[in-house]
Image (cartoon, helix red, strand yellow):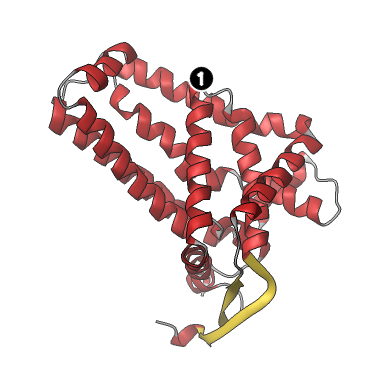
Amino acid sequence: MAQMHVMAGAGDKLDLPVIKTITLADLTEALRRGAADFWAKPSHYFLLALIYPLIGIVLTVWMNGFHTWPLLYPLIGGFALIGPIAALPLYEISRRRELGEEPSWRDAIGVIHSPAMGSIIAIGAMLFVLFTLWLTSAQALYENLFGASPPQTFGAMFNQVFAEPGGMTLAIIGTAVGAAFALVVLCTSVIAFPLLLDRDVGAYVAVETSFRAVMHNLIPMLAWGLIVGISVFVGALTLFVGLAVILPILGHATWHLYRATVDDASMIRTMPHGQRP
């Protein structure tokens, strides 16, 4: 029964939220409101936001010590993959501010007590698997082009990509493979985590609704994915420090994107849990 709840939610029927049509203007509004949430009480958020650049710096030091520079680009991209999980406290802050409350740090961390946490963990595990597959693919591509001996420094890696034969192939194919993984993550999780925090609908419905939201609003959602990707890359160029502001704003904005995309009340009633495919 616990497993059934994780996959299908708390109700006795499979409820699918109704998707609304959004435009590029809704993305701008979501970012505006996300920035407003961030700056409302930045003293609360900087503590949480520092987690992101610290992880990035640790990863960079690790790569420098173990000579795994070929994984730098996919690791940076990984922030976009696993970011939706880490942004859960930010969704909660935006949710509470929407209700007219003054959320605290304790309120943000309180998401761990959400009744949908099992479903959130299930989708988070899926994202972690995708992240691992991305890193494995990147490593395999590099070794296929340059062999098993990685460059010793970032400068050597840079020279390898832009001066040696196979460098452009690595950049182009690596970017295409990363984009494919990012597209899968976008389709399956762009609104899944905010939805679960708002309604305990289960992992299956959250992923299915996220997929429908992307298919129904393909151009705006692809534009959103591009905004997230470029923002993460720009933040990484500042030695990850810029992520302390960029990622929280994106996290808050994702909540407002969810609100713009999913109808507040309307649900499509489907078959009972025991009869679903």
Q: Position of residue 36 (x, y in %)?
A: 76, 41
Give 61 or 166, whichever is nearer the viewer: 166
Q: Residues within 10 Å of mark 1 (few under 14, many from 20)?
A: some
Residue drawn at x 62%, y 29% is 244
Q: Mark 1 points at which residue?
A: 239
Indicate left or right for 116 with 132 as reference. right
Secondary element at image label 1: loop
Locate residue 194: give its quadrant.
bottom right
In the depicted structure, whether residue 93 falls above or below residue 48: below
Residue drawn at x 77%, y 35% is 39
How many marks do you count on the picture?
Answer: 1
Indicate left or right for 88 with 190 as reference. right
Residue drawn at x 60%, y 67% is 21
Q: Where is residue 260 in the image (x, y as percent from the top left)?
A: 66, 61
Give, as a three-letter code, the residue at label 1: Leu
Question: Do we see residue 145 in this rendering?
Answer: yes
Question: Do we see residue 121 in this rendering?
Answer: no
Indicate left or right for 83 with 94 as reference. left
Residue drawn at x 60%, y 44% is 87
Indicate left or right for 105 with 239 as reference. right
In the depicted structure, whether residue 140 falls above or below residue 194: above
